[in-house]
Amino acid sequence: MSAHALTALPSAQPVPAFRGRIGSDARSGHYAVPRRYRLHLSLSCPRCLRIAITHSLLGLEDVCPVTLLPAVPDGPGGEHSALRPLYEASAHRYAGAAVAPVLSDDWSGRIVSTHAPDIMRDLARHFGGGHPVLYPRGTDAEIEGVQRLCAQGIDEAAQRAGRADAEAEERADSLASLLRTLRSLEGRLAQQGQLLGDQLTAADVELWVALVQLDTVDRWHLDATAVHRIADHPHLWAYARRLAAHPAFGPHLDLDGIARRHHAHCRGLEAAGAAVQILDWDAHVSDRAATRPS
């Protein structure tokens, strides 16, 4: 293992409501057929954004249609009311929130999966022929480690560091944890173009979305000094800037939607770091989707 190997943290991901899988033959129940499945995504949600980028990298626009949902959920618990019929058709008397992302089966009118990592992997495995290999052989454990690292070492650490109701020591410890993660990533990206080498993989999708979330959401609750320390990783943010210009990444970046979703549901206090933007994401996006739902 190299000096800049990425250390995976224990997973703390919530168990999703549905975890069906696309298989390779009829015995699987959900076997791979073009245009049988549909994605329901809200691009302001980081899990949905990861799926949208994967979908574009694989060139699946004509294979698996996408229905875009509004940036701000219109129900409690992050519910999108447009998804309620799918959830109720898939589970008798479903009482939870009808949340995105959803991979649905147009043949049955039911949900296959709401688990983003499974959805990304199944799209790549069963519909990604002739396109970038996002899950190279032998990298499964490392990609899963990156998923956990982004979830806990970046997302959760940044949220804890910005909690106004936390003790100063807890916030300082969380910021130190976040900075250790960023230093590890900085060292890796100083040596190679992408996270696992010179080829784009699912690990890069995970990390890029985590960096978007860090700069567009989490920094609103951090002080300016903390944001400047986060920004002081030149290879990491050059990498984020480069991927923002990639046609499969930047066009899905709904900055206005991310801001509206955050401010609609966040009750935290705004801090001085809100004024210290790390990247001008708009300046590096190569293209824009022509329309987005309001």
Image (spheres, grey):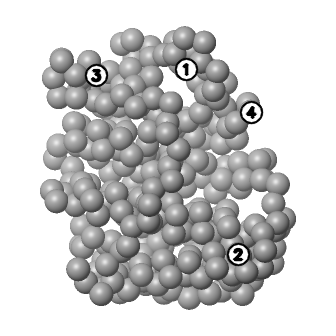
Which corner quadrant holds the C terminus?
A: top right
Look at the numbered disc 4 and give the secondary structure of its residue: helix
Which corner quadrant holds the N terminus?
A: bottom left
Q: Nearer the viewer, mark 4 or mark 2?
A: 2
User: How far apart are the two marked residues, 2 and 3, measured between alpha carbons?
Assistant: 46 Å
Q: Which residue is mark 1?
A: 87
Q: Is residue 211 visible?
A: no
Q: Sequence-wise, which precedes: disc 1 or disc 3? A: 3
Look at the numbered disc 2 and give the secondary structure of its residue: helix
Quarter of the image holding residue 63?
A: top left
The numbered dot on residue 170 is 2
Quarter of the image holding residue 145?
A: bottom left
Q: Sequence-wise, which precedes: disc 4 or disc 2? A: 4
Q: Is residue 188 above or below residue 93?
A: below
The numbered dot on residue 30 is 3
Image x and y of residue 69, in percent: 59, 34
Residue plotted at (26% across, 18% down): 29
